[in-house]
Amino acid sequence: MTALKDTVAELAPMMQGTVPYDAFIVSEGASVIAGHAGETMLSLFPEGSLEGVTYARPEIWSDWQDFAALAEELKTYADALAVAAPNGLEPALPPPRDMAGMDHSAMAMTPAPQVDEGFTIAELMGYGERTQEVQVARGTSDPATLAFDLTTLAADDLFTRISATCSSCHSQYRAGRN
Ligand code: HEC
């Protein structure tokens, strides 16, 4: 889990555009996340391992399928990001142009600029403000189709989904606030 946090912390500024985007680093980082997700993550939570100091909640084992789905979802998004890293960031909106000669219907459709400051560590760990809003679509589509479509997404979009999955799992299955 600590490796996950380090990787997310390394990639976050790149996703927010505060340091130059490097597809190679993003892809490597995504592979690290994928390597800690899915089955590998589940193997860290054997039944009856609630001993000693742990923030793991007993619901992990009563809702095992849901917990396992989140671990798998993290892997799906991270695998997709490893492939989609060269897609780069969502293109910035074009700067406003002179109104003359502009098609008004196109203007009306221009979405408002998105302000996405990324997830804070608190949100990532499941106790930040955004946690309540985070909704991760689960089991809505066939995983193969989902994985295929995901690789066409912008890297920062996938990174947001990864962060949302960390946050979502922690808010449900991790107690404590560090
Ligand atoms: C399937 C659920 C799940 C997902 C997905 C998940 N985690 Fe966790 N994470 C946990 C649980 C449960 C704990 C508490 C473990 C304990 O205390 O024994 C935890 C603990 C942690 C910790 C505390 C340090 C530690 O080793 O206990 C960090 C840091 C962390 N996770 C980072 C992340 C990051 C970053 C992501 C996303 C890239 C992520 N986790 C995805 C379930 C998850």
Image (spheres, rainbow, N blue to C red):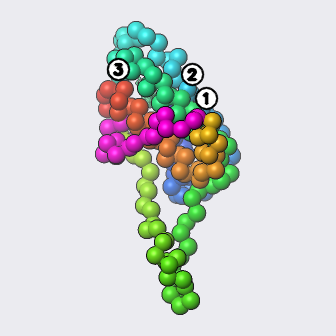
Tag 1: Cα neighbours inside 10 Å, few (<14), some, or many (≥20)? some
Secondary structure, mark 2, is helix
Amino acid on which the number 1 mark rests in the picture: Gly
Return the disc, 2 or 1, that comes first in the chain's sequence. Answer: 1
Tag 3: Cα neighbours inside 10 Å, few (<14), some, or many (≥20)? few
Q: Position of residue 26 (x, y in %)?
A: 62, 45
In the displayed structure, 38 sits above or below 88; it is above
Q: Position of residue 175 (x, y in %)?
A: 32, 26
* Stretch in magenta: 124-143
Residue ID at (36%, 36%): 126
Q: Nearer the viewer, residue 115 or 17?
A: 115
Say whether residue 13 is visible: yes
Secondary structure, mark 1, is helix
Q: Is residue 128 left or right of residue 142?
A: left
The mark found on residue 59 in the picture is 3
The mark found on residue 69 in the picture is none
Residue position marked by numbered label 1 in the rendering:
35
Return the disc, 1 or 3, that comes first in the chain's sequence. Answer: 1
Q: Nearer the viewer, mark 2 or mark 3?
A: 3
Separation (CA) of disc 2 from disc 3: 19 Å
Residue position marked by numbered label 2 in the rendering:
40
Secondary structure, mark 3, is helix
In the displayed structure, 29 sits above or below 61; it is below
From the image, give the main secondary structure of the stretch colored magenta.
loop
Q: Nearer the viewer, mark 1 or mark 3?
A: 3
Amino acid on which the number 2 mark rests in the picture: Thr
Amino acid on which the number 3 mark rests in the picture: Glu
Q: Nearer the viewer, residue 156 or 3?
A: 156
Q: Position of residue 142 (x, y in %)?
A: 57, 35
Residue ID at (49%, 34%): 139
Separation (CA) of disc 2 from disc 1: 7 Å
